[in-house]
Image: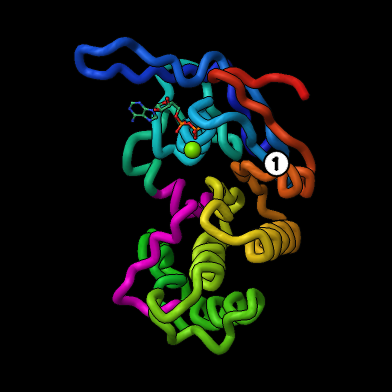
Amino acid sequence: MALIALTDISKTYREPGGAALDVLRGVSLEIEAGEAVAVVGPSGCGKSTLLNVLGTLDTPDSGRYVLDGEEVSECGPERLAALRGEKIGFIFQLHHLMPQCTALENVLLPTLALARRPDPVRVRQRAVELLEAVGLGGRADGKPAELSGGERQRVAVVRALINEPRLILADEPTGALDERNAEALTGLLLDLCRSSGATLVMVTHHPAQAARMDRTLRLHEGRLVQG
Ligand code: ADP
Ligand code: MG
């Protein structure tokens, strides 16, 4: 069974007094557990909206979304919040780290939202190991302002992975990085997802990075297109 199954998902934004904007128009797709998938397409074609629907941050107007066997459209807000905490890790273009917290504290934040709190000693150990795995072993006590752009984004990757999610959603995670850091971050993400069995869905503008994924989904004006 696919980890993600979308059937005929549509989303329209209505601006007050303005025209309706059909952002997703009947999107159907399946993504298997463990796949790494790129989402590409011109600016405004609906990539972020699709990712937000997958992350249950946005609700489609119609269509069906089944995540890991669970009917997402039938979940109430509490279940959705729990589902996000347990199953999904998010990485955005900007790191969204808490400025007053250290790298290690930022990584541990998502564990505080879990209904079943992990053993604090073990989860801290896991966080330290993950920070070491992304080359930040010596920076765990650094605040975001003391880290470089590439380092901050690596902390965001570790934060997304800390709860051992089945799904990582990354919306242009390398968009603010130079080419060398962008390439390294994509490599890290792929390695960490493959070794943990997590599924990766990543929006990117860079064909070279999309080519490193198992396959590419191409959006055009709210529809999936071939090639
Ligand atoms: P992409 O990520 O591919 O650039 P988005 O999914 O962010 O595209 O947006 C698709 C379209 O929907 C854009 O025209 C954008 O302006 C519009 N849009 C996105 N979010 C909203 C919103 N909350 N309200 C109104 N329009 C929105
Ligand atoms: Mg976007």
- Indicate the position of residue 101 as horizontal and vertical percent values: 34, 76
Question: In the rendered view, does 190 fall on the left or right side of 48?
Answer: right
Q: Which residue, given by chain and number where applicable, does mark 1 sit on?
A: 37
Answer above or below: position of 182 versus 107. above
Answer above or below: position of 16 versus 124. above
- Indicate the position of residue 154 as horizontal and vertical percent values: 56, 68
Question: Label 1 sits on what residue type?
Answer: Val
Where ligand 1 lies, by quadrant? top left
Which residue is most to the left?
17
Residue 103 on the magenta segment? yes
- Locate residue 193: give its quadrant: bottom right
Question: In the rendered view, does 30 fall on the left or right side of 14?
Answer: right
- Locate residue 222: give its quadrant: top right
Question: Is residue 81 visible to the viewer in this orientation of the structure?
Answer: yes
- Indicate the position of residue 81 as horizontal and vertical percent values: 37, 46
The colouring scheme, among rainbow, by chain, secondary structure or one colour, is rainbow
Residue 33 on the magenta segment? no
Nearest the camera: 29 or 5? 29
Query: In which quadrant will I find the N terminus?
Result: top right
Residue found 72% across the figure and 61% down from its top: 187
Residue found 40% across the figure and 41% down from its top: 80
Please tell me how crowded label 1 is: few (under 14), some (14-19), or many (20+) other residues with Cα within 10 Å.
many
Answer above or below: position of 183 versus 145. above
Residue found 60% across the figure and 39% down from its top: 68
Give, as a single range, the part of the protein colored magenta. Answer: 82-104
Question: Is residue 71 visible to the viewer in this orientation of the structure?
Answer: no
